[in-house]
Image: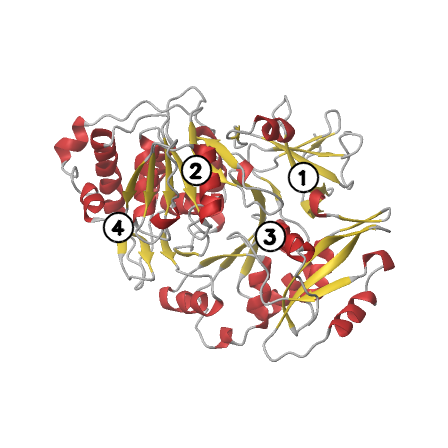
């Protein structure tokens, strides 16, 4: 194996170059993700000299910015155990049952998650902003025996006589009483959770559905333990990180794993009701936040906004960037404007339980064109999508991944599972990538998103980066538009900044001067906003449907 890149020329496989600080627990050892995360918390407490701040009491786990309510770590542990006992005794929940959760940001969410997981119940959280039809699709996939909703979201639960689930309102007095019903020592000592194996499914988390219907990704307790174990390897670089803003939905894999990571290091997590820029900046100032998860479009918004001058952002140390490609040009401009803030880039999928590559070491942070090196325990191949041949460093192909964090499969969809996972456990990501000679992963584009213009392939991200470099443009997306003569043409959707009068012809002329003829934008539309998932990914499927609809107009 090449010590610089991690590439084995015999197997044409890349291996992680990261030092393994802690081994994974034996796969045969019964262990739930609840037990594992809480054990990391106890270990951190016993070995840490945690720093106290005036804003964040070190015992505070979570703050709901919308209400001002707080959840301490001691209450998290006690209420998780009390709710687990209540659910087992009064709702007859047991190992293998599925619980669907439909809730906005709430202090009760982590308590519900970890109590259910400790019982071996499979959690299936959904985005509360989804439509009723989307929710119905998800319910049909996971077939829950119980649904946790709120008075704000319960109306989206369409009654189906073939589904026999019980609905519990998380904001009802009855439910809230369960959080403290069994918080005395005797109840906790006498209660014994079911034996949970690492091979048991822990969660069904839904893919963003950017290019098709949502799929339910089954992650086991062992998958999540592997994600947490590889995450802790970066701790030595982030010793000052105490307060993080939760701008991502806790129903998504990245919000879920970020919450577990916060617990493992006794951090404070602030739940924000919106990702609106002004709210986020105000929260950084108010809570002296050190870490903020963002998408590339949100970094562009930070660069273009004058509101950054209104707030004290000096506490900010890191931005965690994922969900889409971040151009090197934008990264350089951000570094110039915010020289004390590091952008930590990463790559991961719902199917991998979160990040599988990240910029952790100094070399990786300074290489603005990559998403870093493989996480601990990971293997990768770059495969020619046509021949299936594994390729050497520097060659572009589809990224395949293998490791203990790779999903079990898609719930209720054996065909999609077989298409994504081969017989040797390799996950086909659908992303066009390559590794360089130092083992750094460079993302080129989504294979499914490449625009097929004649015999050429056009990455939408390249055109989007150019569009976003125009000061008058607030946001942009590029999609493939069907064309009888050439197959597909690039179509741009553009959001103008307020008071901007930039025209379609000015934009098209600007792009044409910087790209080859086959990459030129040939169809165009101004739009009020770009549809995105909570992870910041462009929902291209929605834009394609909109462009092809009979009543769609491309006039400005």
Quarter of the image with the C terminus is: bottom right
Residue named by callout 1: 430
Measured as percent of width and height from the top left, residue 225 is found at: 44, 33
Residue 14, how many percent across, how many down?
Answer: 67, 33
Q: CA distance from mark 3 to mark 1?
A: 16 Å
Q: Look at the numbered discs 3 and 1 and tell me whether their residues touch, using CB distance below 8 Å.
A: no
Disc 2 to disc 1, C-alpha distance: 27 Å
Tell which of 133 and 274 is nearer to you: 133
Q: Earlier in the sequence, mark 3 or mark 4?
A: 4
Dividing the image into 4 quarters, which one contains the N terminus?
top right
| 354 horizontally vs 486: left or right | left
Instruction: Tell me where residue 392 sits by quadrant.
Output: top right
In this image, 407 relative to 257: left or right? right
Q: Which mark is residue 539?
A: 3
* Res. 224 in view: no
Q: Secondary structure at mark 3?
A: loop
Spatial CA distance of label 4 from label 2 is 21 Å
Q: Which mark is residue 171?
A: 4
The numbered mark at residue 139 is 2
Mark 1 and mark 4: Cα distance apart in space: 41 Å
Closer to the N terminus: mark 1 or mark 4? 4
Q: Tell us which disc is closer to us: 2 or 1.
A: 2
Q: Is residue 178 visible?
A: yes
Q: Left or right? Give the position of 34 relative to 254.
A: left
User: How is the rendered protein coloured?
Assistant: secondary structure
Circle 3 crowding by C-alpha within 10 Å: few under 14, some 14–19, many from 20: some
Q: Are marks 3 and 4 in contact (CB under 8 Å)?
A: no
């Amino acid at each position: 194996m090449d010590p610089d890149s991690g590439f084995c020329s015999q197997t044409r496989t890349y291996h992680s170059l990261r030092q393994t600080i802690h081994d994974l627990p034996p796969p045969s050892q019964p262990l739930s993700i609840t037990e594992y995360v809480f054990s990391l918390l106890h270990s951190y407490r016993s070995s840490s000299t945690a720093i106290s701040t005036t804003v964040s009491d070190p015992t505070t786990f979570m703050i709901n910015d919308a209400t001002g309510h707080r959840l301490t770590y001691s209450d998290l542990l006690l209420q998780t155990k009390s709710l687990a006992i209540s659910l087992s005794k009064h709702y007859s929940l047991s190992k293998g049952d599925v619980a669907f959760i439909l809730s906005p940001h709430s202090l009760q969410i982590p308590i519900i998650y970890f109590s259910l997981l400790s019982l071996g119940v499979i959690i299936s959280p959904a985005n509360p902003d989804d439509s009723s039809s989307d929710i119905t699709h998800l319910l049909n996939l996971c077939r829950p025996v119980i649904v946790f909703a709120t008075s704000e979201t319960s109306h989206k639960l369409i009654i189906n006589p073939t589904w026999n689930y019980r609905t519990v309102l998380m904001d009802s007095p009855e439910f809230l009483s369960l959080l403290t019903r069994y918080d005395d020592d005797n109840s906790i000592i006498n209660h014994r959770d079911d034996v949970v194996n690492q091979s048991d499914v822990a969660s069904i988390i839904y893919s963003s559905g950017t290019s098709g219907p949502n799929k339910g990704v089954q992650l086991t307790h062992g998958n999540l333990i592997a994600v947490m174990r590889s995450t802790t390897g970066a701790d030595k670089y982030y010793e000052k990180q105490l307060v993080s803003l939760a701008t991502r939905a806790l129903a998504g894999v990245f919000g879920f794993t970020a919450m577990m990571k916060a617990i493992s290091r006794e951090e404070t997590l602030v739940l924000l009701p919106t990702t609106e820029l002004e709210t986020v900046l105000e929260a950084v100032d108010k809570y002296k936040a050190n870490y903020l998860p963002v998408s590339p479009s949100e970094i562009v918004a930070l660069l273009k906004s004058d509101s950054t001058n209104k707030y004290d952002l000096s506490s900010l140390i890191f931005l965690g960037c994922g969900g889409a490609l971040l151009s090197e040009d934008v990264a350089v401009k951000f570094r110039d404007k915010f020289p004390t803030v590091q952008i930590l880039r990463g790559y991961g999928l719902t199917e991998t339980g979160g990040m599988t590559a990240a910029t952790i070491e100094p070399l990786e942070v300074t290489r603005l064109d990559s998403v870093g090196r493989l996480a601990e325990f990971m293997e990768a191949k770059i495969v020619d999508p046509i021949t299936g041949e594994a390729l050497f460093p520097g060659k572009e192909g589809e990224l395949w991944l293998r490791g203990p964090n790779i999903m079990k499969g898609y719930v209720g969809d054996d065909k999609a599972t077989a298409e994504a996972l081969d017989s040797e456990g390799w996950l086909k990501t659908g992303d066009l990538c390559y590794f360089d000679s130092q083992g750094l992963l460079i993302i080129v584009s989504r294979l499914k998103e490449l625009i097929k213009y004649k015999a050429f392939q056009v990455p939408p991200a390249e055109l989007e980066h150019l569009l976003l470099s125009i000061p008058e443009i607030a946001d942009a997306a590029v999609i493939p538009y069907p064309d009888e003569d050439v197959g597909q043409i690039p179509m741009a959707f553009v959001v103008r900044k307020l008071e901007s009068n930039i025209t379609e012809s000015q934009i098209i002329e600007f792009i044409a001067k910087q790209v080859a003829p086959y990459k030129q934008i040939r169809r165009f539309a101004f739009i009020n906003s770009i549809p995105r998932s909570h992870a910041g990914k462009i929902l291209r499927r929605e834009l394609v449907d909109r462009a092809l609809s009979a009543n769609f107009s491309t006039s400005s």
